[in-house]
Structure formats: structure tokens, C-alpha cells
Amino acid sequence: MKPTAALAESLPGLLDFTPVRLRARVEGWTPERQRAYVAALARWGRGRLAAQHVGLSEQSAARLHRRPGAASFTAAWERAWIFGEIGRRSAAAPKEPRDFSPPA
């Protein structure tokens, strides 16, 4: 579930946050899963896809970000979402200007 090295290297400082401290649960929000979620959110700009990537729900991610002690994770989440949203929108934008003039 760890983000790829290439993705992590392309996100300088984005994965540098303090994970939310929780009791240890293999199937829960481990520090590694929190980092993988933030990396996936930066990649796709979509919380649902990022949550699916780490095998948890978008609702549980929202609950995690509202927990006491989640300020660092929340700040990383917000930066990742902005990063992902910008990338998503620029990927959807036309690569070349389109000519909409009527044919001659």
C-alpha cells in the first residue's frame, strides 16, 4: 500500500506530515496507509479514489481528518487535494488551442 518511490519523489514535502496517532490495527489507518492516501489524493485529486487505493472508505478518511491531533494530516490532505485537483484539471484541458472558426 506504500506510494511508489517516483510518486513520493514528485511530491516534495507533501508526505512530510505527522500521521494521526491511533491504536494499532492492521486493517486501519496506519501511518503508511495515511501517507499512501495523501499520495493517491495528490495523484488523482479525488478522495474516493484515494480511499479505494488504500482499501478504506472515503467516510473513514473524513472521520480521521476530524480527529483530535489530525492537524498535520489535514494540512497534508488539503495540499494533496489542491495538487491533485490542479493536475486533474490541467490533464482535462486541451493540449493545443482549438480553432472554432467557421470553415471557409
Image (cartoon, rainbow, N blue to C red):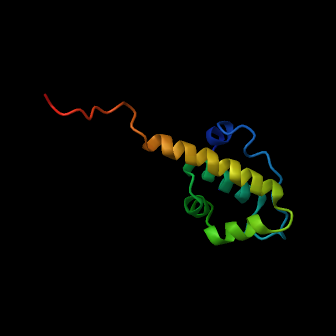
How many numbered tags mark residues here? 0
Q: Residue at x 76, y 52 (%)?
A: 75
Q: Where residue 15 appears, x then y in whole percent?
A: 74, 46
Q: Where residue 71 appears, x then y in whole percent?
A: 82, 57
Quarter of the image with the C terminus in it: top left
Q: Residue at x 68, y 37 (%)?
A: 9
Quarter of the image with the N terminus in it: bottom right
The image quadrant of residue 94 is: top left
Q: Is residue 81 left or right of residue 73?
A: left
Q: Where residue 98 appears, x then y in whole percent?
A: 31, 33
Q: Where residue 40 appears, x then y in whole percent?
A: 61, 52
Above or below, comparing residue 80 to residue 67 in the picture: above
Residue 61 in sight: yes
Above or below, comparing residue 33 to residue 27 in the picture: above
Residue farthest to the top, as pictured: 104
Residue farthest to the left, as pictured: 104
The image quadrant of residue 63 is: bottom right
Is 71 or 2 nearer to us in this picture?
71
Q: Is residue 9 left or right of residue 70?
A: left
Q: Residue at x 67, y 39 (%)?
A: 11
Is 3 or 14 nearer to us in this picture?
14
Is 6 or 100 nearer to us in this picture?
100
Q: Is residue 42 left or right of residue 93?
A: right
Q: Residue at x 55, y 51 (%)?
A: 44
Residue 57 in sight: no
